[in-house]
Image (spheres, rainbow, N blue to C red):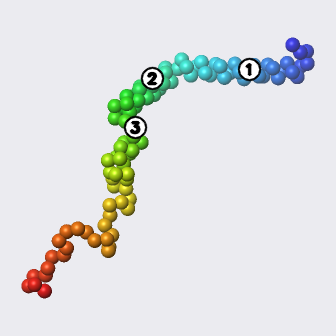
Amino acid sequence: MTSNPDQIREQIEETRTNLSEDVNTLADTVNPAQAAKRKAASARSAVRGAKDKVMGTASESVSSTRSAAGGTAAGSPGENVSRPGQGVSGPGPAAPPGGG
C-alpha cells in the first residue's frame, strides 16, 4: 500500500472502472431480454447443427455435386456451353423444302 495520493487516486479510478464493467456484465446477464436473445441464438445454433448433421454443409454439397458432375459443379459459368465451330452431334440443319 502506498501513501502517495496520486497513486491512491489512480487505484481508486481503476477499481471504479473494473466495478462498473462487472456491474454492466451482471446486469446484462440477468436482463430478461438478453437472456431470451441468448436462448434464441442457442436454439438457432442447435437447429443449424442438426440440419448440417443430417443434410451436410454447403461445402460438402458442392463437393459431392462436383464429384457427380465429373469434377465441375453443374451449371458453372462457361461449362457445357456449345460454341461456334465445336460441332454438335446430330443430324445437322434441315434441308430447305424443294430439295434446294
Q: Quadrant of the C terminus?
A: bottom left
Gap in angstroms between the C-alphas marked 1 and 3: 47 Å
Residue 89 place in picture, x, y as percent:
23, 68
Circle 2: residue type: Lys
**Residue 91 visible in the snapshot:** yes
- Secondary structure of the residue carrying tag 3 is loop
Residue 73 place in picture, x, y as percent:
36, 51
**Which residue in the protein does label 2 denote?**
39
Residue 98 place in picture, x, y as percent:
8, 85
**Which residue in the protein does label 1 denote?**
16
Residue sitting at x 32%, y 61%: 80
**Image quadrant assignment for residue 9:** top right
Q: Earlier in the sequence, mark 2 or mark 1?
A: 1
Residue 69, above or below 77? above
Residue 76 place in picture, x, y as percent:
37, 56
- Secondary structure of the residue carrying tag 2 is helix
Gap in angstroms between the C-alphas marked 2 and 1: 31 Å
**Image quadrant assignment for residue 86:** bottom left
Circle 1: residue type: Arg
Please say if the residues under marks 1 and 3 sit with CB atoms less than 8 Å apart: no
